[in-house]
Amino acid sequence: MSELFEAVDALIASASPLPSPTERKRLRQAHGLTLDQVAGALKVRRATVSGWENGKTEPRPPEREAYARLLNKLAELYPAPAPAPTTSASSSSVPEPFAGPAAKPSGGRAPEPFAGSVAPEPFAGRVAPEPFAERAPESFVGPAPVAAPHPMPSGPAQDARPRSMGSGPEATAMTHEPHTVPRPAGATTSTPAAPAAAPTRPVPAARPTASSRPTASSRPTASSPRPAAKKATTQPTPAAAPSTDARFENGPLLVLDADADRNVTGYGTGGLVLDVPAKSLPALIEWTLAEARLGAPRLNGSGKDADPVLVLTDAAAARYGLPTRLSDEERRAGRLPEDHKVCKQLAKAEWQLTRRGFGPWARIYRPATGSQRSCVQLCVLGWDALDPRTWGEAAELAPADLARVLGTYATRVITPRGSTAVTGLELMTALHPPTRAGEPDETGRRRSEHNPGSLGTQPAPCAPPEAPDGHPLLADLPRFHQRGPDEMLMEEAYDWARPLTDAECLHPYVVGIDVNMAFAAGANGAIVGLGAPERVKQPVFDAKLPGSWLVDLSHIDLDPRLPSPFTPTGERPTGPAWYATPTVAYAIELGHTVAPIEAWVRYETGRYLDTWYQRLRDAYIATMADLGVTSGLTPQQFLAAMDGHQSRDPQLALVLSAIKATVKGGIGKLRERPRGGGWRPGQPWPALSRPTWRPDIRAAVIARTRINMHRKMLKLAAATGRYPVAVLSDCAVYPADGPSPLDVLPYGPDGKTVPGSFRLGVSPGMVKHEGTQTTLWAEGLREQHGQTLNLARYIKTGEVTARDDGQ
């Protein structure tokens, strides 16, 4: 009989009722679950769950019963929203006037959000220490499809190169769960003390609105009746397609421009053009949150969706009462004065600004009510929100073109929320949120708990040798005391040069090779500390234990034709010095004995930066592919593809520059120094209050980058007898008999080169051509500026624009 019951149960389970595919997706997203999480729980492939949600397939036993149980539980937590009220044909043809944040006008009503929408959560007022930007939640639009490469012209490669940092491994590392390293018996438990720390006009029916998205056949373009300030040259970009999440149908951001009649138009991703009805800044914020459908889904299931971003051109800024340029006093303060009329408008409408005030990247919010957020970020172009050092001439583009650039970046990396450095740092938090939802308590309410693998919500103290000059931990030092290597961790990128030998002067050329995304590659696979440091006397070195070690490596004698791997200057150490774990581990790899005197180590560890690296790697490779440089090319094909690649699509070249700057700036922000007036040595500065102020992680990444550079140079020297004459961060200059990198790097008929050395290619950690000059140029430059002049700094163009740092 039991067998019959089991057969009946299986028959019922085989037809377990399931909601519609659309409802299945809504329920999953409402709970913040990813496809991977559901697939893992049900022990099926990600593509299988995706098929269930798009209606292509239906689940079968035994997974069907478990899937039905999951959806039923989620339906209890997130009931289906009530259908939107119907309207007559006459009322639907012309949208009703929008009610601003003040009292609604007689006979008007506030616009209702679309069915199934999830209101953004209010910004909690958390202060970000970075100037001109505040913290923002995560955004993700999914992996970007790669466009077909452009034709590849032949000829020598002379790529336009912004300075990046270091080198690193080329393989993608697997994710690594955080773990705790056992403490040695001699470990102490001391840790350093943490430092104190009006109604608007109706929208004409002929114009598209945020609640009436135009189709591809009817969508207005930048050349529609309301022209942009400049003629747009936008090209379609697969990565800038609108989000598939209905809540963010119109993409992550809008670029707003105004015409001579003060009508405002918003330009979005995928060629979207919207009429913006708001006549005041408070009304604009209300419209954005209620109707615009802007934002991006979270990058991590435990994170938060990205707030919408509005980019204001000069015309749009003036339309909403903002100055097109900041005065000298306002620029020094980084904000408008609190008594500015726009700030008063926002306060009257019960909108708030973060402590950073109304600056180039202003965050406008209302306090959180439960789990609901109400926050919009503004980017004011005329206030230098897009730094030309990282964004090039992006601020000068036509609005539609700028929307393409910023939308592509937001899709592939994250919605920008400040400088590229700020955004790089925020990407780390977006991928590893500090908290996650815990188990329900007796009332059924879920409380937040620490998210394993993250840096937490509180700043971790740094060890004394990791603290930069002026840190509160060093307040007792004499005022003019200069700390040496035995007191301060000095892990920095290479800046080294040596004179050419007589034999090297016989080579007609010097050729520079540059490592792609070197700092990102250096972060890949790095084991970093997640908690507070602990001091250990006479420790036994452990390469898996991140921290700072006081070690004497002066006894290690290496070939003087290569820079020392232990110092940024490439000079041999002269005594005990503090090193990050990767540097000490490399000394052992070279066959030398180490005996640490002291250490500050972290026992809770993890590969915190792996997903950060993978996100930026994918963004870089996808953008390079759009520019005609793809993976899998032969060395000759790669050099030909790199020749003039940035000129094929100047807008995507701006995206590429911003991606590189995100890597470099994000790592640099881990040890942000004090800025602005009023600070005194020994006093804390704002950056110290954030969990991502981690000089030890920065040191570990830089050490790995420098070590990887030395390892590749050493492999090349052992196989070919070729040595660099200058190294600057991720660029090495070699004497050569020809002008091509192929005259430096040996490639056999099989397309292979020296194992473990430099390889030409597009992936992070591989190299490209930086520039070529004649040996006569190099010798003439050094006769004029000194033999220690670093040729790698000028190899790209051959022009000396500033004296070398050492001069």
Image: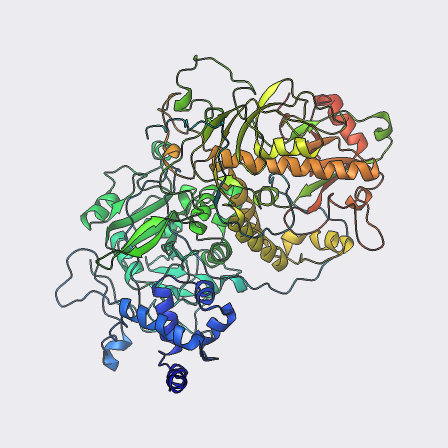
Q: Nearer the viewer, residue 704 or 93?
A: 704
Q: Is residue 634 left or right of residue 82?
A: right
Q: Position of residue 785 (x, y in %)?
A: 70, 22
Q: From what the image shows, is residue 300 above or below residue 484?
A: below
Residue 207 in sight in this render: no
Q: Is residue 533 left or right of residue 122?
A: right
Q: Nearer the viewer, residue 457 or 269?
A: 457
Residue 373, by quadrant, is: bottom left
Q: Position of residue 759 (x, y in %)?
A: 73, 47
Residue 218, by quadrant, is: bottom left
The residue located at (82%, 40%) in the rendering is 719
Q: Nearer the viewer, residue 503 or 21?
A: 21
The residue located at (87%, 28%) in the rendering is 503
Q: Is residue 711 left or right of residue 406?
A: right
The residue located at (48%, 80%) in the rendering is 56
Residue 139 in sight in this render: yes
Residue 385, by quadrant, is: top left
The C terminus - image quarter = top right
The N terminus - image quarter = bottom left
